[in-house]
Amino acid sequence: MQRQIHDKDRGKVLWEMRLFENIRFTDTVEQHDTLTIAPAFVQDPGTFYNTGLEFFGSNFLKLPIETVHENDEFTTHCPAYFKPKQLFPLAYFVMFILERSLWFQYEAHCV
């Protein structure tokens, strides 16, 4: 039985498909421990930003994610919109990881 996609969800499904066309889970230390992004996806800031807006709304990349640097390691707290124990589509989680990585880089190199 196929699930019907409502018009209000169609945009998110299309964005998820576009996201999955641009990411790969690859191996660095262990199997599938690294998220690799197609350069074209992040070289076009408008596409990347609009994808984030589709998943998180207007708070994407506007509210810094609290990052703590201790003992040569960075840790982070989840932003208010991301509830770790809730069910999310994989694309939502991937965009959260990308946003978190951007804040890590900002904290490591700009602060």
Image (spheres, rainbow, N blue to C red):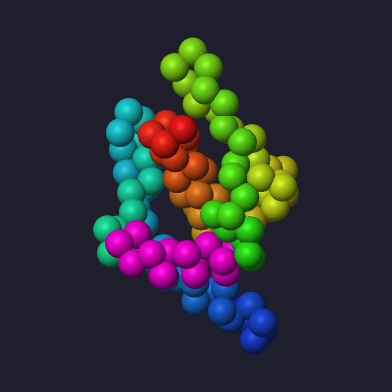
Determine if the magenta segment contains residue 50: yes
| Rendered-image quadrant of the N terminus | bottom right
Q: Nearer the viewer, residue 63 or 18?
A: 63
Taking the view exactly as shown, the residue that stands out farthest to the left is 39
Determine if the magenta segment contains residue 79: no
Residue at x-position 54% and y-position 74% = 13
Q: Quadrant of residue 23?
A: bottom left
Q: Nearer the viewer, residue 106 or 88?
A: 106
Where does the image place residue 98, in percent across and percent down from the top left?
A: 46, 49
**Measured along the vertical axis of the image, is residue 47 above or below residue 63?**
below
Residue at x-position 54% and y-position 54% = 61
Image side of residue 45 versus residue 43, left or right:
right
Q: Quadrant of residue 46?
A: bottom left
Is there any visible trace of residue 89 in the rendered image? no
Kindly report the secondary structure that dominates the magenta region of the rendered protein: helix
Where does the image place residue 78, in percent across and percent down from the top left?
A: 65, 40
Q: Nearer the viewer, residue 95 or 66?
A: 66
Taking the view exactly as shown, the residue that stands out farthest to the top is 71
Q: Which residues are magenta?
A: 42-55
Residue at x-position 49% and y-position 70% = 50
Image side of residue 68 versus residue 19, left or right:
right
Residue at x-position 42% and y-position 31% = 108
Image side of residue 43 versus residue 72, left or right:
left
